[in-house]
Amino acid sequence: MLVKSLFTSAAAATALLSSVASAQTISPPSGSNATAGSGPDADGKYWLFGNGITASFIPYGASISNLLIQDQYGIVRDLVGGFDNATYYGIDRQHPHFGGVPGRYANRIKNSSFVIDGTTYNVLPNENPEPGHPDGVDTLHGGPDGWDWRNFTVVSHEANSIVFKIVDPDGDQGFPGEVVSYITYTLGDHTWNLNMLAFATTKITPIMLSSHTYWNLDGFANNETNLVLNHSLHLPYSGQRVATDTILIPTGDIAANQPGSVNDFWSAPKQIGANWTDPDLLGNCGYNCTGYDTCYLVNRDQNGPYDWQAEDGYVARMHSPWSGIQLDVYTDQEAFQVYSCGGQNGSMALKKTQGLFGGENGSAPLFPRTIPQYGCVVLEVEDWIDGINQPEWGRQSKQIFAPGDAPFELQATYKFSINPATTPV
């Protein structure tokens, strides 16, 4: 094995990431003028500080832009995809949804339409164009100008917390009624906590939010592979998934993830790439696609009442044996989308806080400083996708909201720890 110092020389590492002030305090990258609760730094990023975790967020899409954790060797890793400067998020249209909040309806809407109380609503399509439908045949993440393409307002910014707000007007992207939403991010003890509230203020309307963060628990710095196929994944409550057609639109059927099958991450942890040569994986994420873009159901009800924050109640656990970083995801949501970044093509540059920079003698890095296909994984806490077009699923109370109703709410905690074992425990 190549030595871990291939991440960078000691001097270069110091130049890229400020030294760790203590075992529990991680500083932002060198050159950042960020201080606790001081507003945006020179790159337009708002920095939060927790115990053993530091992260930055930007108003564009209410997006996470950096998340810094020490690995098992004490080296700081930036675990999320994004850009070095906040202004670039609104310029680069080739790499959407990096760390943002898709809304007002996350994931896909079949035929870009839905029916509420007998009225059919048509929203703007933006995926899968075909003859006669140049803009697409379905709507993804709220349409061509969904929330993760827009600037939110910063309501408050404190040392460990930030609140964003967006007002989505009646008729935008074709959705009925105004929606007002507040997105709160808080850092705790090696945790990133999310709370998303959204209120229908004028008309009944669908609402379903999520977080669309691109993860690589090696900080894109693994000197053995630049893929995430080495990451182990465990979805202990996900023995079922939403069945989809060749363009990932739900068919209405619920499919079983049989033990040992390519979609079985519930019976035991396994590497994301464990079944990569299995013929059943071809087409698993759409036509001629190998990998995952899959909505797994979170079936906890069979165990009776549950506390989503309970220590043993994670809905997903991802672990890298190389960095030793383990991510446990806790949420009140009842579905969990896994996307293995099959759409990445090596054109997305890494940030200055990520990747390999060559050996001790300045030799060329082992891998390009870009995100390759399967070089990341997106984990989306959410409700059952396209539930507004599947009334037989009974998700209306989770996805359709009227003025005066209790708001849509999403709660989640991402908990980080170090586990040097090859298999997560």
Image (spheres, rainbow, N blue to C red):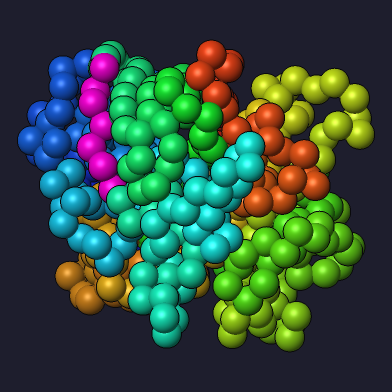
Q: Is residue 215 toward the left or the right of residue 410 in the image?
A: left
The one nearer the camera, 291 or 352, is 291
Q: Which residue is painted at 47% across and 53% down in the image?
A: 122
Q: Which residue is painted at 71% across and 38% down in the image?
A: 395
Figure check: 129 above or below 112: below
Magenta-highlighted residues: 149-155
Q: Please check the rendered image and state whether residue 128 is part of the magenta-colored stretch, yes or no.
A: no
Q: Please check the rendered image and state whether residue 150 is part of the magenta-colored stretch, yes or no.
A: yes
Q: Position of residue 32 (x, y in %)?
A: 13, 35
The one nearer the camera, 16 or 58, is 58
Q: Is residue 333 toward the left or the right of residue 354 in the image?
A: right
Q: Position of residue 278 (x, y in %)?
A: 74, 82
Q: Position of residue 113 (x, y in %)?
A: 53, 55
Figure check: 129 above or below 82: below
Q: Is residue 204 toward the left or the right of residue 303 in the image?
A: left
Q: Position of residue 400 (x, y in %)?
A: 60, 33
- The answer to whether residue 370 is seen in the rendering is yes
